[in-house]
Amino acid sequence: MKDQLLAHFGTTDAVLARIVSLSAAYDLPGTPLGSVFEAFARSIASQQISGAVARAILGRLTAKFGGRFPTPAELAATPVAELRAVGFSGSKVAALHDLAAHYVDGRLPPDAELAALGDEAVIERCIAVRGIGRWTVQMVLMFQLGRHDVMPIDDFGVRNGFRLAYGLKGMPRPKALLKYAERWKPYRSAGAWYMWRAVDLHQAGQLPRREGRAPRIECEAPRDKPVKKAKGKAAKTVKHPARKKRATKRTAGPAATRTRAAKKRPARKR
């Protein structure tokens, strides 16, 4: 598929085409890990904790079911106390039970039926589950269902890769990035995937320099760098234009006052 992508991006986006030529072949979905239900459950489990901790918790969960991942019905029937004992927080237990309930009562269909729906229809159904947002569903669309035209504009890695690849001074705003990526259709998933590769190339010192001007795209303003102070004191941003005001005050000192006073006195006759 790499040759196909090179041919497409070669006529629509030269910067992206160079990144494709320097990177590994795009391959989605690869080998999905389990069902969509399992992918969502693992995503909920991994929120706001390290990967190692999440794997340990999920390992204890699967151990309760003979080393396999529980079905929606089994997870729905698992008491809160047992899931808390495994290591899940109260909010994650609520989210996992809500996910299982959506599958048990049919609000979320089996994978084959879900795969027959359009991207937005899948997103609309899945974000109704507690703890699942649009980005999570987009990752499932890409890596579980193999959709090639998904654009995860809120993904930090995608936005940062775009900033690096296109030589922007700030992070592109999500809506602006979505508009720019129209030229990547029908391979926006590949475009996003190669933005992740752009970060890898940058870290390895292999990202090619952009030729010509950066695209005119709305970016977030770069944050002010804090001015470091003495140890023990918090750093804060200092606005240097205040120096000009102090300099102006100094010019209006005693000498200037004497000059004005001299102008008011009548000239002495000699």
Image (cartoon, rainbow, N blue to C red):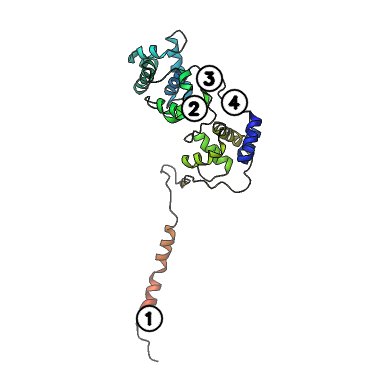
Question: What amino acid does circle 2 point to?
Answer: Met
135 or 241: nearer the viewer: 135
**Image coordinates for residue 270, horizontal then vertical, percent:** 40, 92
**Image coordinates for residue 71, horizontal then vertical, percent:** 42, 13
- Give the structural element (helix, strand or loop) at label 3: loop
Give left or right: position of 210 versus 43.
Answer: right
Q: Is residue 266 above or below residue 51?
A: below
Whether pointer 4 and pointer 3 mark residues with C-beta atoms closer than 8 Å, the reply is: no
**Image coordinates for residue 237, horizontal then vertical, percent:** 43, 48
Whether pointer 4 and pointer 1 mark residues with C-beta atoms closer than 8 Å, the reply is: no
Between discs 4 and 1, the one toward the N terminus: 4
Name the residue carrying label 2: 139
Name the residue carrying label 3: 32
Name the residue carrying label 1: 263
Q: Give the image quarter of residue 26.
A: top right
Question: What amino acid does circle 4 point to?
Answer: Asp
Name the residue carrying label 4: 27
238 or 100: nearer the viewer: 100
Between discs 1 and 2, the one toward the N terminus: 2
Please identify, in this view, whether the residue under mark 1 or under mark 2 is nearer the observer. Answer: 2
The Cα–Cα distance between marks 1 and 2, rounded to whole angstroms, is 78 Å
- Give the structural element (helix, strand or loop) at label 4: loop
The Cα–Cα distance between marks 4 and 3, rounded to whole angstroms, is 12 Å
Question: What amino acid does circle 3 point to?
Answer: Pro
Between discs 4 and 3, the one toward the N terminus: 4
- Give the structural element (helix, strand or loop) at label 2: helix
Between discs 2 and 3, the one toward the N terminus: 3
The Cα–Cα distance between marks 4 and 1, rounded to whole angstroms, is 85 Å
